[in-house]
Image (cartoon, grey):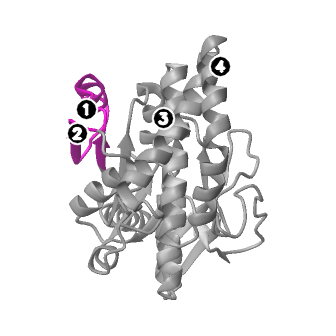
Amino acid sequence: MKINNKLNQEMSDKTFSNSVTIIIVLYKESYDLIHNTLKKIENFKKIIIDNDGNNILKKKILSRFKIDKYILNKKNNGFSSGYNQGIKLSQTEFTLVLGPDCIIMEQDVKILVAKLLKYNNALIVSPTSYDEKNNLTYAGGPLPEYAEKNEILDLKGDTCVDNTLGACMLFKTKEFIEKKFFFDENFFLYFSDDDLCRRIKNKNRSIIQIFDAKCIHQHGNLKIKNIYSKMFIREYNYFFDKLYYYLKIEKHQNLVISFQKKLPNLILKLFLKLIAFQILDVVKIFSKILAYYNFKRKFLRRDGRVV
């Protein structure tokens, strides 16, 4: 009897793990970091999209882990594009998008699936996030137009949120694809999860942060070693993506006008920092100015109206 129960449990676990595909998008991550994430989810189907096209890393990962699809992109089109690429390749009932620096255990994925099936109106469920010292960290809350992401929800149970991080979110694959809830690929690195959640809420669907499901997440740490490249990528993409997000909700004018007023002083400051050879500050200022002009060129007419 005990043997039969054990066999049934093993078959049940196998059926469950075959119903979930986990998608991870990489860009210049170290093997050690991705190893720590993958070793907790070995029983699931996995799709890796590497926007850095790192064949050496691919060979190293494949020598240790079973990856169902491993895509090397020749061009880095951003995390939104990478996630969409993976979602379209997913053939299981459920898909979990997971940041390479976000660790989740198999039992927590099981809880997420059970909760998604329980809450009929939920389109996305996400775990409660902790740091490596078991302190609560930000996982969900209001949309950015209403509040900053600085208030950590101390949940007492499953909670509907307006917004959840793209670092760990689970949904039904077929529904997500058929209703075209893809990530907007005009977002390169930031605000794509905010935009997705806002569109979901506009369709009167729920996003639920699950109290009993846990993940460990290193928030916002770009894995790029060169400090100047890291500064440029963070500042440029954050400002560009922020402008685009507020353009989509038709609240971009204040941001644009405010930046335009600061622009002469910023350009002067840029040259002064350059003369003083304060290169990190130069990169920070230049990245915002470039993001502003590229945003205007791509999306706005000269009078500020949308192209």
- For the residues labelled 1 and 2, the Cα–Cα distance comes to 5 Å
SS category of the residue bearing label 3: helix
Badge 1 or badge 3: first in the primary sequence: 1
Left/right placement of residue 59 relative to residue 78 reads left
Q: Which residues are magenta?
A: 47-75
Q: Quadrant of the C terminus?
A: bottom left
Q: Is 52 within the magenta?
A: yes
Question: In x, y percent, where is residue 131?
Answer: 68, 43
The kind of residue tagged 1 is Gly
Q: CA distance from mark 1 to mark 4?
A: 35 Å
Label 1, on which residue?
A: 53
Please state the horizontal and vertical placement of residue 177, each as a whole percent of the image. Answer: 28, 73
Residue carrying label 2 = 73
Mark found first going from the N terminus, 1 or 4:
1
Note whether residue 108 is visible: yes
The residue that label 3 is drawn on is: 233
For marks 1 and 3, give the CA distance: 18 Å
Rate crowding at label 4 as few (under 14), some (14 to 19) or many (20 or more) other CA atoms within 10 Å: some
Q: Residue at x 26, y 22 (%)?
A: 56
Quick one: 85 or 7, which is closer to the camera? 85
> Mark 2 and mark 1 in contact (Cβ < 8 Å)?
yes
Task: Judge whether 214 appears above or below 25 on screen.
Answer: below
The quadrant holding residue 288 is: top right
Q: Which residue is mark 4?
A: 273
Q: Crowding at label 3, few (<14), some or many (≥20) Cα neighbours within 10 Å?
A: some
Numbered disc in front, either 3 or 2? 3
Between marks 3 and 2, how big is the CA–CA gap?
A: 18 Å
Mark 4 in CB contact with mark 2 (< 8 angstroms): no
